[in-house]
Image (cartoon, rainbow, N blue to C red):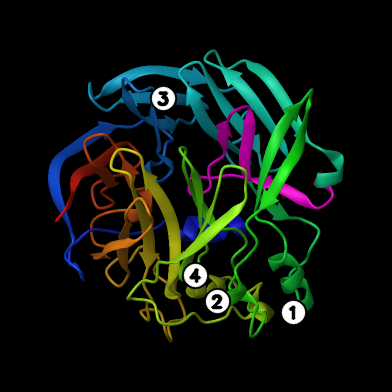
Amino acid sequence: MIKIFNILFILFILFSCSSKTNRIELELVNEIKINIPRGSNFIFTQYFTDNQNEYLVWLDSTNKLIFFNLEKLKTDYSIKLVNFNPKWNYYSIINRDSLIIISNLHNRISAVNNKGEVIGDWKLSTILQEKYSLFAQVDNPIYFIDHKFYCSSIRNDIRLTNQKSFKEYYDSPTNIILAISSDTLKPIKQFGQFPESYYKDKIFNFYDTTPSKTFNLNDKIVLSFAKDHFIYIYNLNGEFISKKNSKSSHIDYFNEFDNSKINNFLYLRSYIEEEPSYIRIIYDQYRDLYYRLVKHRSHANKGNTELNITNKDYQDFSLIVLDNNLELLDEITLNSNEFYLPGLIPTNKGILIPNTRKSNDSLFYGSIYKVKIK
C-alpha cells in the first residue's frame, strides 16, 4: 500500500503563478528537452552534482544509471548496476566514484563503485530488524554523512487495524542514524516521532506511514508530515530543535481514512487524490531556501464510480517558500495542467520543474525558473 500511496501522489501537476504575499517571483530562465533512456520515467529523476558539473540521473530498463550533464546537454557517463531490482531497491549517489543502494525489502545497504561492483555490504542489526524496515525513495532519500547513514524507518511488526495499533505506530521514530560496524549497521539514534496532531485529541488514521525529509548539511534535518501544518527541525545528531508553523492557506482540515475500506482500491485512490497533503519538503542549497509542496483538496471524483487519474485539470498545488530560518516568504498557487511539481529539482541556475504535458517515456521536458525574492 505504501508503494500505491507514493505513486499516486506522483501523478500530476503544475505551474501557474499567483501569489498571496507577493514576496517571491519566478522568472523563466531556460527550457530543456532531453532524450531519456528507454524504460526510464521522468517521475523518478534524480539530481547529482560533483561541484563542477550538474547531472540529471535516470535508471534505464537494463539497470544502467545514465548521468546527463545539464550544462553540456549530453550524457557524460553511466554505471551498470548488478542484481538491482527497482521495485525494492533505491540508489543514492555519493560522488562520481560511488553510490549507495538500499534494499527496502532485505534491510541491507550496499556501496557500489563506478563499475557497478559492490565494495561494501551491511545489514541492519538483528534486534532492530525484528521491528523496523529501512525505507528510501525520491522524497525520502538516504544520506551518507561522516560515515553515518541517515534513513527512514517503518515499523514492520504493527498491523494498523485499531486505535491502539495506530497509537503505538505514532509513538515510534520515523528515522534512524546508522553507523557501520564490520558488516552490520548499528543504530546510533532514532528520531522523528509523529506529531501530536495525529493522536492528541483523537487517534487519527491519515494513511500516512512516514514523513518527507530534507537536509541542510550545515546544521539541520527538516521533517514534513503529510497531515500536519508544522515542520520539525532536528540537528545532525537527531536531536529535536524546534518546530515551525508552515500552514498552507489552502488547507483547513484533513479527513480521516476509513480503515474498514482498506481493501477497496477505488476508495483508496479517491482518498489519496481528493485529500489535501503536504507532499514533500526540499532544501535548495544554491539559494539557502526551503520548498514545501502542497496538494490541495479536490472534489472532482465525488460520486464517480470510476476515477480518471489522468485528468489533471481538477488538481491544484502550491509551493510554500521558506527562508533559511524556515520562516514563510510566500505561497505560490499552482495548477496541474503543465508541470510535475513533486519533481522539482534545485539547480545552480534555478529550480527545474518537469513538464508533464510534453514529457513521456522517451523525452524529458523541463523549465528552469530563477527564484527572486522581492
Residue at left offset 37%, top offset 81%: 299
Who is closer to the viewer here, 336 or 278? 278
- Sooner in the amino-acid sequence: mark 3 or mark 2: 3
Rendered position, 165 above or below 48: below
Mark 2 Cα-neighbour bin, 10 Å: few <14, some 14–19, many ≥20: some
Asked if residue 209 is among those painted magenta in the image, a careful observer would answer: no
Judging from the image, what secondary structure is the residue with disc 2 in?
helix
Judging from the image, what secondary structure is the residue with disc 4 in?
helix
Rendered position, 332 above or below 282: below
Q: Quadrant of the N terminus?
A: bottom right
Residue bearing the label numbered 3: 66
Judging from the image, what secondary structure is the residue with disc 3 in?
strand
Judging from the image, what secondary structure is the residue with disc 1 in?
helix
CB-based contact (under 8 Å), mark 2 and mark 4? no
Asked if residue 134 is among those painted magenta in the image, a careful observer would answer: yes
Q: Give residue 310's quadrant in the image.
A: bottom left
Q: Quadrant of the C terminus?
A: bottom left
Residue at left offset 63%, top offset 23%: 111
Mark 3 Cα-neighbour bin, 10 Å: few <14, some 14–19, many ≥20: many
Name which residue type carries label 1. Answer: Gln
In the picture provided, is 89 more to the left or to the right than 299? Answer: right
| Residue 45 coordinates in the image, percent (x, y) | 40, 39
Using the image, tell me which numbered label, if any, was put on residue 163.
1
Range of magenta residues: 129-151
